[in-house]
Image: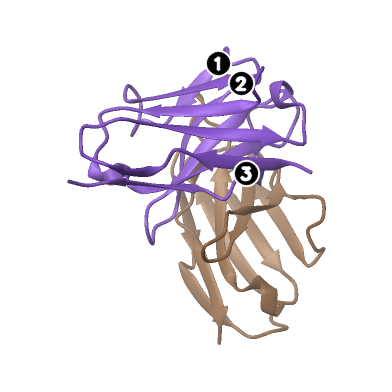
Chain colours: A purple, B brown
């Protein structure tokens, strides 16, 4: 059974940093691209970032480019999102998600339960 | 690439046929997915490649379209289908996958 478990969310001041983690199990982690998607309170979904299975290719939404860094440790089956220079508009539930097809960054077929990041002074 | 969805919300009854439209600002071939999200839950993949039903999803859900215009159809709405539905495009280069604004389906 595929499981994705996010952690690392919390309250942070504007300008601060936070690192999210996503522990994966139930599939061959290194064979699949992974993504982060966020949802501000009461708002729609926003794709944030994706990374290839090897970690060699990364992709970012314009809203987070230069501030967020996606990475993965395939030996630990864990996905990360390092978030720097946080702003109030980054407040959201952050989901990690697995790409459906093998070896491609595509639609997401499994999602974690989400972790809430609140940026406020 | 921007996505628009219509309607933004709709009220329907159990048994109704429901159609939601997603329009892309430029052609995306068939690189479109549909998700269902219930309050407080993670999204669930329903359809990918515009018309391919994800494993385990009931056959009352169907998708169609290519290029810029896409539809999600629920042939006979069931109580568990009341939710918000999002389309997602997966065609842009550089790779930036955007979601539509969502369509909320609630009980009439």
Q: Which image quarter holds the N terminus of chain A?
A: top right
Dot label at residue A82? none
Instruction: Find the distance from the CA under tag 1 to the CA under tag 3.
Output: 22 Å
* Count of residue discs: 3
Q: Percent from the top left, x then y, of residue A58?
A: 51, 20
Q: Splitting the image into 4 quarters, where does residue A89 fall?
A: top left
Q: Which is more toward the observer, A100 or B108?
A: A100
Instruction: Find the distance from the CA under tag 3 to the CA under tag 2.
Output: 19 Å
Q: Percent from the top left, x then y, of residue A86?
A: 27, 35
Asked whether, in this view, residue A70 is left or right of residue A63, the answer is: right
Given the image, what chain letter belongs to the residue carrying mark 1? Answer: A
Q: Are marks 1 and 2 in contact (CB under 8 Å)?
A: yes
Determine which residue is flagged by label 3: B32
- In this rendering, the label closer to the viewer, 3 or 2: 2
Determine which residue is flagged by label 1: A57
> In the structure shown, which secondary structural element does the residue marked by tag 2 occupy?
loop
Q: Percent from the top left, x then y, of residue B88?
A: 56, 46
The answer, for residue B17, to whether it is visible in the render is: no
> In the structure shown, which secondary structural element does the residue marked by tag 3 occupy?
strand
Q: N-terminal of the two: label 1 or label 2? A: 2
Q: Splitting the image into 4 quarters, where does residue A100 fall?
A: top right
The answer, for residue A112, to whether it is visible in the render is: yes
Q: Residue at x 48, y 51 (%)?
A: B100
Determine which residue is flagged by label 2: A52
Given the image, what chain letter belongs to the residue carrying mark 2? Answer: A
Q: Is residue A88 above or below residue B62?
A: above
């Amino acid at each position: 059974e595929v499981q994705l478990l996010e952690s690392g969310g919390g309250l942070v001041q504007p300008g601060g940093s936070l690192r999210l983690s996503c522990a994966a199990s139930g599939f061959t982690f290194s064979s699949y691209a992974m993504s982060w998607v966020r949802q501000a309170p009461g708002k729609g979904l926003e794709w944030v970032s994706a990374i290839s299975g090897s970690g060699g290719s990364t992709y970012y939404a314009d809203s987070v480019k230069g501030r967020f860094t996606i990475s993965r440790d395939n030996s630990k089956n864990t996905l990360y999102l390092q978030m720097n220079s946080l702003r109030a508009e980054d407040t959201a539930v952050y989901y990690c998600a697995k790409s459906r097809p093998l070896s491609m960054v595509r639609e997401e077929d499994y999602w974690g339960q989400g972790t809430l990041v609140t940026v406020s002074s | 690439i921007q996505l628009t969805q219509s309607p933004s919300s709709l009220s329907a009854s159990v048994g109704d046929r429901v159609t939601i439209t997603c329009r892309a600002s430029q052609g995306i071939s068939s690189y479109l997915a549909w998700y269902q999200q219930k309050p407080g839950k993670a999204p669930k993949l329903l359809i990918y490649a515009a018309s391919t039903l994800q494993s385990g999803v009931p056959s009352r859900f169907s998708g169609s379209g290519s290029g810029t215009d896409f539809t999600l159809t629920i042939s006979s709405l069931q109580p568990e289908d009341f939710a918000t539905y999002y389309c997602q495009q997966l065609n842009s280069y550089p790779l930036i996958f955007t979601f539509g604004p969502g369509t909320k389906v609630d009980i009439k």
